[in-house]
């Protein structure tokens, strides 16, 4: 049985790495579009979260997929699933 089946459905998000200064931890910014309740125009909202990166393989600017996991520290509740796109330059 795969890990996903054994542990149930987990939330998954796509974001961009904004900081990789910590050891085995990266900070990822996630953007989402929400419709304004009065003006009905789409507004981009963003949130930052700390993600577990055990091999320190992510760099600033990388686009990644992260999945929900058990609490790993006071702030970390997500772990790196895969790197979708490497930063250019």
Image (cartoon, grey):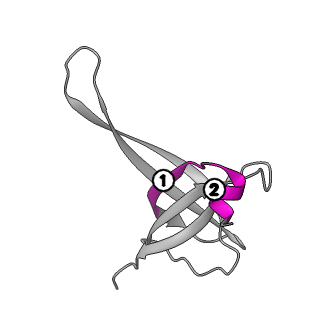
Which residue in the structure is indicated by mark 1?
Answer: 13
The residue at the far right in this view is 73
User: In the drawing, does residue 3 fall left or right of residue 74?
Assistant: left
**Circle 2 crowding by C-alpha within 10 Å: few under 14, some 14–19, many from 20:** some
Residue lying at 29% horizontally and 17% vertically, measured from the top left: 37
Judge by depth and name the residue closer to the eye, 54 or 5: 5
Residue lying at 20% horizontally and 21% vertically, measured from the top left: 40
Percent across and percent down for residue 45 are: 38, 38
Question: Per the image, is 10 magenta?
Answer: yes
Disc nearer the start of the sequence (1/2): 1
Percent across and percent down for residue 17 are: 49, 65
Judge by depth and name the residue closer to the eye, 36 or 67: 67
The residue at the far bottom in this view is 89
Q: Which quadrant does the N terminus fall into?
A: bottom right
SS assignment at label 2: strand
Q: Which disc, if any, is residue 50? A: 2
User: In the drawing, does residue 53 fall left or right of residue 46?
Assistant: right
Q: How far is disc 1 from disc 2 in space, using C-alphas?
A: 12 Å
Q: Is residue 46 above or below residue 37?
A: below
Q: Which residues are magenta?
A: 3-16
Percent across and percent down for residue 36 are: 28, 23
SS assignment at label 1: strand
Percent across and percent down for residue 67 are: 58, 57
Q: Is residue 24 above or below residue 39?
A: below
User: In the drawing, does residue 60 fall left or right of residue 24?
Assistant: left
Pair 1/2: label in front: 1
């Amino acid at each position: 049985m795969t890990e996903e089946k054994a542990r149930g459905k987990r939330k998954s998000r796509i974001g961009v790495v904004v900081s990789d200064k910590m050891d085995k931890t990266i900070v990822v910014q996630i953007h989402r579009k929400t419709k304004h309740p009065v003006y009905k125009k789409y507004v981009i909202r963003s949130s930052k979260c700390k993600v577990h990166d055990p091999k320190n393989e992510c760099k600033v600017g990388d686009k990644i997929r992260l999945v929900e996991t058990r609490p790993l520290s006071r702030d970390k509740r997500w772990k790196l699933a895969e790197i979708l796109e490497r930063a250019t330059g």
